[in-house]
Structures are given as structure tokens and as C-alpha cells.
Image (cartoon, rainbow, N blue to C red):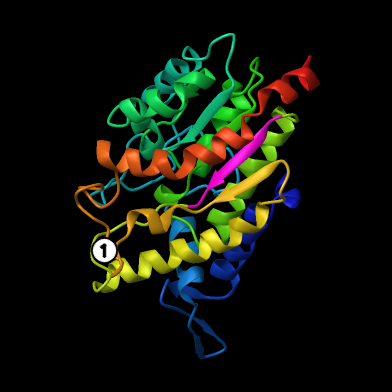
Amino acid sequence: MSTLENPGSLRRVALCLAVIFGGLVSPAGAEVEGEKIQPNEEQKLLINSMRRGVQPADEPVAFLDLDLGVVGRPNPHFGEISEKFLRKHEERMNRKKESVDLVFLGDSITAGWTGAGIRTWNEYFLQYDPVNLGIGGERTQHVLWHIENGFLDEIDPCVVVLMIGTNNLSHHSNQEIAAGITRIVDVIHEKLPKAEVLLLGIFPRGGDPSEKRVREIRERIRKINETISKLDDGEKTRYLDLSANFLDESGQLSREIVPDGLHPNGNGYRVWGQGMASVIDEMMDCDVKTSDRN
């Protein structure tokens, strides 16, 4: 896909021009003919991500795309394809079997199904010949790369379960994240035209909503979920938001099911499985779908 065909690239080109010709001196503001112009929060995030070398959320990426490390030091591997990334890709590729009816795509939260969530996985989903292709640390652009490099090749599942985007929150705007998720859903349908997609809303994160930081990130997640919920067409794509299943009446994310405020433990995967199983059972009407595929 060329830059002119990709909205994410066009946005970044526009920002580059703003930086070069608009006199942008910091993410906090720009000087245009002596007048201070303040970008909004999403524009600040776009500016910062552009300066740090972050790829658009709706373009496939296989390399380390941050030019700064986690402590703000230059990343010596910036722009290089990560050997660890490729090893994880190949390991997941090797998980695929001749018969796969249910595929899970996502980040570490999804990857945990075959770790902390294995009992619930076996109870609810093992009957469907599932494969877990989730990888820790993944963002939307990484999932796109995996799909374009074989993740969904030579399999013919009934259902693909997708949850992705929480790792994009520090690097991309709400609009970009929703665009990345939309692009993934589109590519899944391109690769697997007879499969259905169960798109999950991004799970809530952070413990106490009385904390400003937690409120802000929860609100961002809510807005992203609201946008991607519109991808539900009642046929090939279903949307499911399980946020309420993880929160108590005051909005607290219980440490008994999500100890670190992000990753479910065994109890958390049971909550997830119980909330999702009936939907998957309904979508996995493979007697009909198999006759259509053969």
C-alpha cells in the first residue's frame, strides 16, 4: 500500500510538513506568524510518536520501531527486525495444525490463555481444535505483519477471536488504534473470507478509577471500543465488550482476577471464558460452515 493510499501515512506526512514549515518547536505548541497554537492531546501523541519513530498503527511492522529505549536512551536496534520477534512468529506458525476451527489473535493477554488460562481454555475451547497465536507485547501493526506473513495461511477456521490495542495506547492516538484494529479485521476477512471474526473490546486496565491516570486511560479505551463496536455487521464480524465482567460496581478492577491491573490470572481467564463461551458456541456452527467450505 502506497503512502497516498494509507490514511495513517498521510496523517504523518501532514504532521511532518507542520513540523518543517509550521515552525513547531515542541509537542506543547507551534508558532505560526507569532501566534501560539496549542495541539490537542491526540495531536500531541501523534507528534511525539512521529518524532520517536513509531510506525502507524494500521501498517504492518516487524521491527523495533522506537528510537528511544524504555529509559529514554537511544535504541541501538532501532529499525532492525528483531530476532526474538521472528522466533516468536515461527513458534506460533508451528502451532498451527491441519485442522483448526478456532484461532485466537492478540497480545500477552491472549497469549495467557495457554498459560494461566489453560484450564478454562481446555474446558470451553479445546473441543474446537483451537490455536493460540497471541504474542506478548504485540501492537496492531505487529499483528498485521504476522497475518501478512503466514499466520492465517493454509488454515480454514470457523472463527477468529481478536483482541488487540492496549499496547498501542502509549504510542498512538485513539483514531490510529481504531484504524489499526479495523485494518486487522479487514485483512482477516481478506485472508479467510468464510470465517467469522469475534472482535473483543479492549479490556479495562488499572485498578482504582479514582486515580486520574486510570480514569484517563479507561476513557480512551471506552472511546476506542465505541468506535470499533461499529464493525459489528451482524454477520461476518461480531463485537463483544466484556469490560463490565471484570469491574465491580465502583469500577474497581479486582486484583483477585487481574493482579497487575492488566493481565488476568486463572480466575480472570475463567471470567473471560464464561463471558465469551456462549458467543463462540453460537458462532462455531461448523456443520453448516464446513459444508460451505468443502
Q: Mark 1 highlights which residue?
A: 252
Specify the quadrant that holds the C terminus.
top right
16 is within the stretch colored magenta: no
- The kind of residue on which mark 1 rests is Gln
Q: Which residues are magenta?
A: 195-201
What count of labels does the image hold?
1
Specify the quadrant that holds the N terminus.
top right
Q: From the viewer's perspective, tell me whether residue 113 is left or right of residue 127.
A: left
Residue 245 image offset from top left, x and y in percent: 38, 54
The answer, for residue 63, to whether it is visible in the render is yes
Check the image and name the residue furthest to the bottom: 35
| Residue at the image position 42 percent from the left and 69 percent from the top | 219
Within the image, what quadrant is residue 138 found in? top left
Of 39 and 183, nearer the camera is: 183
| Residue at the image position 26 percent from the left and 47 percent from the top | 70
Q: Is residue 269 above or below residue 222?
A: above
Of 102 and 30, nearer the camera is: 102
Residue 131 image offset from top left, x and y in percent: 49, 21
